[in-house]
Amino acid sequence: MNHNKYVLALVLAFAMSIFAQEAPEKTEPEKIAVYVSGASEAGINKSLGSKLLAAIAQSGKYAEIANSEAFHEELAKSQVAASSGQIVQETAKQHGADIVCAVSMTEALGAYSISARMIKISDSEVIKTASLDRALKSLDDLTMVSNELAAKLLGLAPPPVAVAPPTVEPAPVPTPVPAPVVKSEDKRKLLSPGFRGGLNLSYLDVEYYNQSNESLDGGTYNSTLGFQAGLVLDIAISDLFHVQPGVMYIQKGAKDDDNVAMTLHNIEIPLLLSFKLSALRLNAGPYFGICLDSNMEYGCDFVSDFDIGISTGFGFDIIDMFYIGVFYDYSLIENERGLGSYSNRTLGLNFGVNL
């Protein structure tokens, strides 16, 4: 029985020794400190150092020293460069580091040449090196450089480079073309025919002479009522200047001493220049007339078979379709009969439709 106890004890002891040999020995990662120098701006040194330390520690191969901030402050007071390896190593050793990563930066042509060395403090052996040439213009650039350095120093695959998606230019938005503004003249085109008609008062202006052909006092025959009607053609040379030729039938004449109407039946061709100011028209120009018939004893010869004069007046276009105006015809023909010369004057009111 005692023999069995001894055998069981030996088996248990042998098994425990094997388990003790196979159990993995737990070891803590080595402590590392990172120091960066050489950048023209101190903020770049500090930012790159902290990002590189975080990238190395993230791998799990190395652990950050207890107080990195105190380590950097002490080196900053010493004003040393990363190339001053002995001072950096001694300071890192004082803060519990097993490894120090010294990074130096040299600026040239807007970019930095960056070199890093991982140094084992116990024997000053350089165990890893890495170098990069990069421009540092943003925090993203610092992060990318620190990750690339960490990958090279630790022998890891380089981090993927973020590729910006291709810029797609937005399709040009077509500029809307405004609809052409059509003026009233454009609606009626360049040529616009129209109808005119209305009433007028005519009288004869008389100048008397004596036997010696000396001028005496003049006078007038009383006016007589007549009417006119005809066609006009409005030619729009521009918005302001229009020309209006026409053909009109018009009654002219006067009343004699017995208050009997003397009527001349005339065909006139006016050629007016019309100044159009919005709805207002100012008209002036010559007219040419032919007397067709008369109810007087002497017929058309009492005044003249042919008449030339000046016509003036003004009027208004109403919604571009209707017209109302006044005119005054001044005859330049003086017909001499007996001891006097006669010429016609006419004041009229006319209405119209613009087609």
Image (cartoon, grey):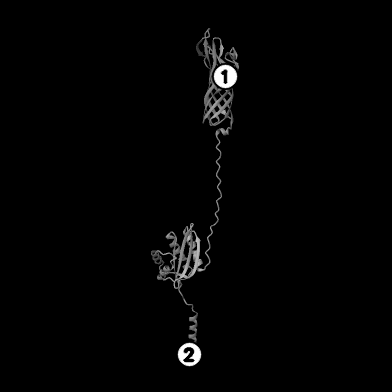
Q: Which residue is mark 2?
A: 6
Image location (x, y in percent) of residue 33: 44, 68
Q: Which residue is mark 1?
A: 308
Q: CA distance from mark 2 to mark 1?
A: 162 Å
Residue nearest the viewer, comparing 115 with 301: 115
Residue nearest the viewer, comparing 34 with 255: 34
SS of the residue under disc 1:
strand
* Quadrant, the C terminus: top right
The single residue placed furthest to the right in the displayed view is 292
Instruction: Let me know if residue 1 appears in the view.
Output: no
Q: Residue type at mark 1: give it.
A: Ile
SS of the residue under disc 2:
helix
Callout 2 crowding tier (Cα within 10 Å): few <14, some 14–19, many ≥20: few
Instruction: Let me know if residue 241 appears in the view.
Output: yes
What count of labels does the image hold? 2
Q: Residue type at mark 2: give it.
A: Tyr
Image location (x, y in percent) of residue 32: 44, 69
